[in-house]
Amino acid sequence: MRRPARLAAALGAALTAAPAWADHPVPGMRSAGWDPLTTALVFGGLALLAGAVVVIVVAVLTRRPDSSE
């Protein structure tokens, strides 16, 4: 299959995609979202935790050996 044919097939598949069922279009099946402040605090805390883990891993991996003379 040539490149333009692949591009046309991919474009056609993307344009004919069905709506996602994860959105739950049935009334009463969709749960309420989080409050924006709660979302910001939770994901901000997770980002802080991930940054702390990265700093700890880098500190452990770049530690110099003890020079006991």
Image (spheres, rainbow, N blue to C red):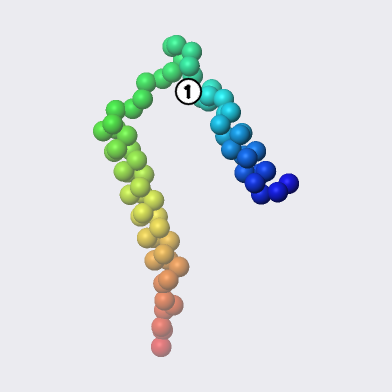
- Determine crowd level at label 1: few under 14, some 14-19, many 20+ residues with C-alpha closer than 10 A: few
Q: Which residue lies furthest to the bottom in this view?
A: 69
| In-front residue for pair 43/49 | 43
Q: Which residue lies furthest to the right in this view?
A: 1
Residue 43 screen position, x and y as percent: 34, 40
User: Number of marks in the image?
Assistant: 1
Q: Which residue is drawn at 44% across and 77% down?
A: 65
Three-letter amino acid code of the residue under disc 1: Asp
Residue 46 screen position, x and y as percent: 36, 44
Residue 7, image quadrant: top right
Residue 61, image quadrant: bottom left
Q: Which residue is drawn at 65% across and 38% down?
A: 9
Depicted 46 relative to depicted 30: above or below: below
Q: Residue furthest left?
A: 37
Residue 1 screen position, x and y as percent: 73, 46
Check disc 1 and report the residue beneath it: 23
Q: Which residue lies furthest to the top in this view?
A: 27
- Quadrant containing the C terminus is bottom left
Q: What element carries label 1?
A: helix
Residue 32, image quadrant: top left
Question: Along the horizontal axis of the image, is 66 left or right of 8?
Answer: left
Residue 24 screen position, x and y as percent: 49, 19
Q: Residue at x 36, y 54 (%)?
A: 51
| In-front residue for pair 51/9 | 9
Depicted 4 relative to depicted 31: above or below: below
| In-front residue for pair 4/64 | 4
Q: Residue at x 33, y 38 (%)?
A: 42
| In-front residue for pair 1/68 | 1
